[in-house]
Amino acid sequence: MAVNTHQDGKLRIERLSGSLGAEITGIPLTAAGPAEAGRLRELLREHLVLFLPGQHLDPDQHVAFGRLFGELESHPNLDLRSERPEFFQLHARGGQGGIADEWHSDLSCADEPSVLSILQMAKCPKVGGDTLWANMYRAYETLSPAMREFCEGLSALHDADPHGHSERTAIHPVVRVHPETGRKSLFVNEHFTRRIVELSHQESDALLGFLVRWATSPRFTVRYRWTAGTIAIWDNRCTQHHVLDDFEGDRLIQRVTVMGDHPKPAAPSRWDPYIAPLSAASRHDRQLSNHLRDRAEPRGGASR
Ligand SMILES: [Fe+2]
């Protein structure tokens, strides 16, 4: 596309970077129905993350809008007394932690990781607290043919350690296929991914270290500066994101999440899980061993 802005009926669509992200105006989400959700899904397949400023949805409107995209899930960190179990709110104060300042795909530690996230920035600092997203199709497609083929035969262990539950683990393909676009994307991230299942832990550290750095190269990313009342919708199957903890003051996000599915591998598993006998000192070897024992499934594709 040669231009970065175009008008589509009432919609104005502005691309925000060469890799992904578009700002959409001219669509009030309080009045959105299945037709509008269908159009937004098309735009999401093209741009991977959409930003819709000036929406100011109340929690019921936010949940109703989210349901247009599928069944919503509860977040593992939710207060169970909440009236709306699918409505997640996180209030962070600058410099005091509590934000996702590592690259991740939402809940990749789950057997069925979140498909879409729909976030409203309810309150944001005057400056700072931007969020970055990265395009995992591009991260995969720009690897060498040899590395692409190697990675397609691998799977990786993810855990919920960032939520205080390192015993909750899942195994997903390193390269997954998007069920709607048929495109392959890289599916490892620094926040939740611990170990490549088919390699020794030393080899895994080297490859995983490379892949998570590669996946978030600046040329695959977009950085968004928030205003209060903006809704962002992103596809966790082909993106990662990272919040910048560089702000002072309050930052309040509200989010609903569309339930996940089993990531489909790009290729059948080619090798068995590998745990060298002398590497028991590795915490992630023990985690992998426990996961395989608990699931007791043949070959490495335990969670596929
Ligand atoms: Fe997140």
Image (cartoon, rainbow, N blue to C red):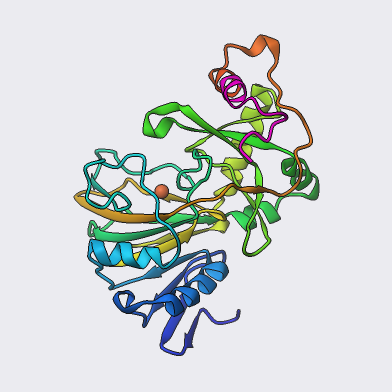
Residue ID at (44%, 73%): 37
Q: Nearer the viewer, residue 76 or 298?
A: 298
Q: Quadrant of the C terminus?
A: top right
Is 149 rendered above or below residue 64?
above
State which quadrant residue 177 falls in.
bottom right
User: In x, y percent, where is residue 27?
Assistant: 36, 80
Is 116 rendered above or below residue 161?
below
* Magenta span includes 18: no
Left or right of 205: which side holds 283?
left
Residue ID at (40%, 33%): 162
Q: Judge whether residue 295 can be spotted in this image.
A: yes
Q: Quadrant of the N terminus?
A: bottom right
Is 91 rendered above or below residue 278?
below
Residue ID at (39%, 62%): 224
User: In x, y percent, where is residue 241?
Assistant: 46, 51
User: In x, y percent, where is residue 193?
Assistant: 54, 35
Farthest residue in the left direction? Answer: 249
User: In x, y percent, where is residue 22?
Assistant: 47, 71
Residue ID at (79%, 36%): 270
State which quadrant residue 188 falls in.
top right
Q: Which residues are magenta?
A: 289-304
